[in-house]
Amino acid sequence: MLEIKNLHASVGDDKPILKGLDLSVPAGEVHAIMGPNGSGKSTLSYVLTGRDGYEVTDGTIIYDGEDVAELAPEERAARGLFLSFQYPVEIPGVPTLTFMKESLNAQRRARGEDEMSAPDFMKHVREKAKLLNISGDMLKRPVNVGFSGGEKKRLEILQAAVLEPRFLILDETDSGLDIDALKVVSDGVNALRSPERGMLVITHYQRLLDHIAPDKVHVMSAGRIVASGGPELAKELEAEGYDKYVRAA
Ligand code: ADP
Ligand code: MG
């Protein structure tokens, strides 16, 4: 479903960050990426979703059989690529419900589908919000404004649940969550698992992977995937750290 080959990418004034990254995530699978700070994990998530200021200088990103490296962010979103930000942004003045309804309908229009009506949308959101313990009051407030760290992360997952993307990238969605919020977020992520859907979960913590049993775990260091394995690799990293992989890279 997602095939990344020899990906090189730079940020800002031609600063190379990704340096020959290979990664393949088949539909139906959940893959985790772990790795030290500064290894390029967030950069990878931005390059995949097409954020401004990031340039692919070599290699390919094949998503559903199509090279998406040159597509605009909204074109990738319409194809079902979704990123949950490591640092969700506040959007003062825009009510959360309006924001989500506009996002959903913009994607439906781009796919040539009918827009969802206001009552249908409300029903759709309420159902998903309940699972994530998000109140109607929170949804009326401006996007992320005054939300706690945990609320912001839960809202990211609600957006995913509402948009029903085909490929999700979660960038440290678990960091800063207490144990209860972590459980709620993991349940939300697990509810999105499906044979048609792929996921890339960037995390530092085994505790998230205890809830979301990943099919594969990859270690990223200095802009490349330097090791891959099963869930046991995450346990090894937790016990021994990244040292051996950093030195090898
Ligand atoms: P990770 O998410 O693995 O911690 P990042 O992808 O955030 O790593 O960062 C990788 C490297 O790229 C870091 O050295 C960081 O300082 C650098 N970097 C990220 N964004 C920019 C930017 N806009 N301009 C210059 N350097 C950047
Ligand atoms: Mg990061």
Image (cartoon, grey):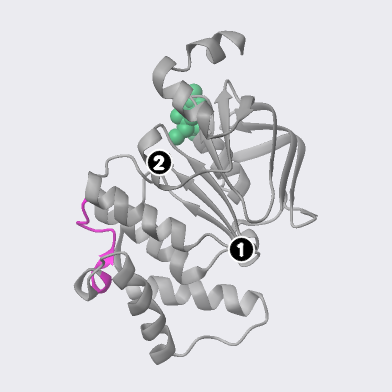
Q: Position of residue 202 (x, y in %)?
A: 48, 39
State the residue in front, 182 or 47.
Answer: 182
Which amino acid, mark 1? Gly
In this picture, which residue range is highlighted in magenta?
139-148
Q: Residue at x 55, y 75 (%)?
A: 106
In the displayed structure, 84 sits above or below 196; it is above
> Can you identify the residue that label 1 sits on?
80
> Can you identify the residue that label 2 sits on?
210
Residue 60, quarter of picture: top right
Report the label total: 2
Residue 97, quarter of picture: bottom left
Q: Position of residue 126 (x, y in %)?
A: 33, 78
Label 2: element kind: helix
Left or right relative to 235: residue 230? right
Inter-mark Cα distance, 1 to 2: 27 Å
Left or right relative to 81: residue 34? left
State the residue in front, 163 or 206.
Answer: 206
Please state, as top left, top right, bottom left or bottom right, where the C terminus lies in the image.
top right
In the displayed structure, 70 sits above or below 128; it is above
Which amino acid, mark 2? Asp
Instruction: Determine if the C-beta at disc 1 is less than 8 A from ligand 2.
Output: no
Q: Position of residue 226 (x, y in %)?
A: 63, 22
Q: Choose mark 1 or mark 2, whichever is in front.
A: 2
Secondary structure of the magenta portion, mostly?
A: loop
Label 1: element kind: loop
Left or right relative to 70: residue 163? left
Q: Residue at x 52, y 34 (%)?
A: 231
